[in-house]
Image: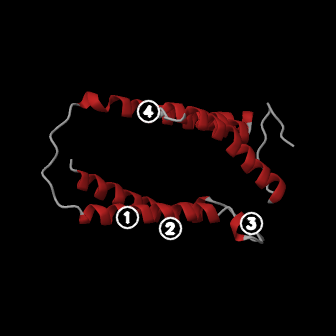
Amino acid sequence: MTERQVQLRLGVGAIAMALFLAAIAIPNWVSSPSNVGNIVLSPLFWPYVLAGFAGLTGLGLVIAGLREAAQDPAPETDDHAHGPAWRRLAGMAVFMLLTMYALPRLGMVLTTMLLFAATAFLVRTRHPVTAVICALLVPLVLYGFFAHVAGVAIPQGEVIRLP
């Protein structure tokens, strides 16, 4: 498969997913109270933003794929070359399942810290110290903003109670 075909397929897939999210998934499965004063604090706002970014990314991939000249197909590669990629994909699926199990027990902040660090090491980051620092600080800063500035309740776990 050529680079052009990959970009076109990924782009069309991203646009289709964005349309599905915006037209079906978000309106039907994301609930929002009617009295939210600030639109940024609405549970509908960020899913729509992410769907929009996914659609724009897909559009960019389609445009880049169409601009690229058609090439001869790449030579067939050995299936064993994709082994590490499939293992990482399986690892991410396991992380997602563990996240759903850990959220009610550990709370959102501790779970995201662990997941961020685990994902960084799964993809073999070149900056492990930065990844660990970000894994600790980003969820804490977000918790501080949402809990104390925006007044949004963040799910706490059974292990640690944050102020």
How crowded is the residue under tag 3: few (<14 C-alpha within 10 Å), some, or many (20+)? few
Say which residue label 4 marks: 88
Reading the image, the residue beneath label 2 is 23
Between the residue at mark 3 and the residue at mark 2, the CA separation in whole angstroms equals: 19 Å
Task: Please tell me which of labels 4 and 1 falls first in the chain.
Answer: 1
| Disc number placed over residue 33 in the picture, else none | 3
State the image coordinates of residue 21 (x, y, percent, origin top left). 51, 61
Q: Amino acid at mark 2?
A: Ala
Q: What is the spatial separation of the Cα atoms under label 4 and label 1, in whole angstroms?
A: 26 Å
Which structural element holds mark 4?
helix
Question: Hey, what amino acid is under mark 1?
Answer: Gly
Mark 1 vs mark 3: which is more N-terminal?
3
Q: Which mark is residue 83?
A: none
Q: Which residue is mark 1?
A: 60
Of helix, strand and loop, which one carries label 3? Answer: loop
- From where the camera sits, is residue 153 visible? no
Residue 8 seen from this side: yes
Report whether 161 appears left or right of 3: right
Is there CB contact under 8 Å for labels 3 and 2? no
Residue at image point 35% right, 59% down: 11
- Residues under numbered marks 3 and 4 in contact, where contact means CB atoms less than 8 Å apart: no
Task: List the single residue furthest toward the right.
Answer: 163
Which one is in front, 94 or 76?
76
Look at 76% across and 69% down and name the residue there. 36
**Cβ–Cβ below 8 Å for labels 4 and 1?**
no
